[in-house]
Image (cartoon, rainbow, N blue to C red):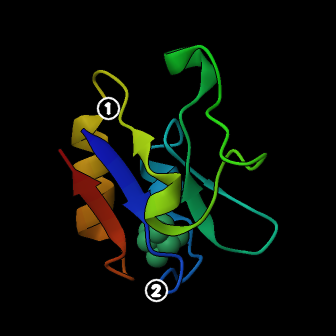
Amino acid sequence: MKVWIDQDLCTGDGLCEEIADEVFFGKDDGLFYVKESTGNFGEEKLYDGDAHPAGPDGMARIPEGGLEAVIEAAEECPGECIFIEV
Ligand code: SF4
């Protein structure tokens, strides 16, 4: 399972990171992004030098045991902008 955020809709409230900080994090632009943490996947994935691009280009794998929290984050997200894909 994978997850991504549509930053065009993100309110920047940080609720997702509060629920699942292994997956969600905020950048200096005040918006939130997804990551594949090194603790779960060994290496950060890079796309043309950017480890965490916006939108579906930045789609990250959900770590083992992390799906429930990611689903909760998606359900609670006020921007309704967290998308989970198989
Ligand atoms: S919960 Fe949704 S709206 Fe809030 S920071 Fe995370 S992605 Fe953005």
Disc 1 secondary structure class: loop
Queried on whether the Cβ of the residue with tag 2 lies below 8 angstroms from ligand 1, the answer reads yes
Residue tagged 1: 66
Real-space Cα separation, disc 1 to disc 2, in angstroms: 23 Å
Q: Position of residue 68 (x, y in %)?
A: 22, 39
Q: Position of residue 46 (x, y in %)?
A: 67, 39
| Left or right, residue 48 beside residue 8 | right
Q: Position of residue 54 (x, y in %)?
A: 58, 66
| Left or right, residue 77 beside residue 57 | left
Q: In the picture, residue 38 is in which quadrant?
A: top right
Q: Residue drawn 64% across and 72% down?
A: 31
Q: Residue drawn 35% across and 35% down?
A: 62
Q: Residues within 10 Å of mark 1 (few under 14, many from 20)?
A: some
Residue type for callout 1: Gly
| Left or right, residue 75 beside residue 26 | left
Residue type for callout 2: Leu
Q: In the picture, residue 86 is in which quadrant?
A: top left
Q: Residue furthest left?
A: 86
Label 1 or label 2, whichever comes before in sequence order = 2
Please tell me which residue lies in front, 72 or 84.
Answer: 84
Q: Residue drawn 61% across and 33% down?
A: 45
Residue tagged 2: 9
Q: In the picture, residue 56 is in which quadrant?
A: bottom left
Query: Mark 1 near mark 2, Cβ–Cβ under 8 Å?
Result: no
Eye-nearest disc, 1 or 2: 2
Q: Quadrant of the N terminus?
A: top left
Disc 2 secondary structure class: loop
Q: Residues within 10 Å of mark 2 (few under 14, many from 20)?
A: few
Q: Residue drawn 32% across and 32% down?
A: 66
| Left or right, residue 68 beside residue 14 | left
Q: Is residue 77 above or below residue 39?
A: below
Q: Position of residue 74 (x, y in %)?
A: 29, 62
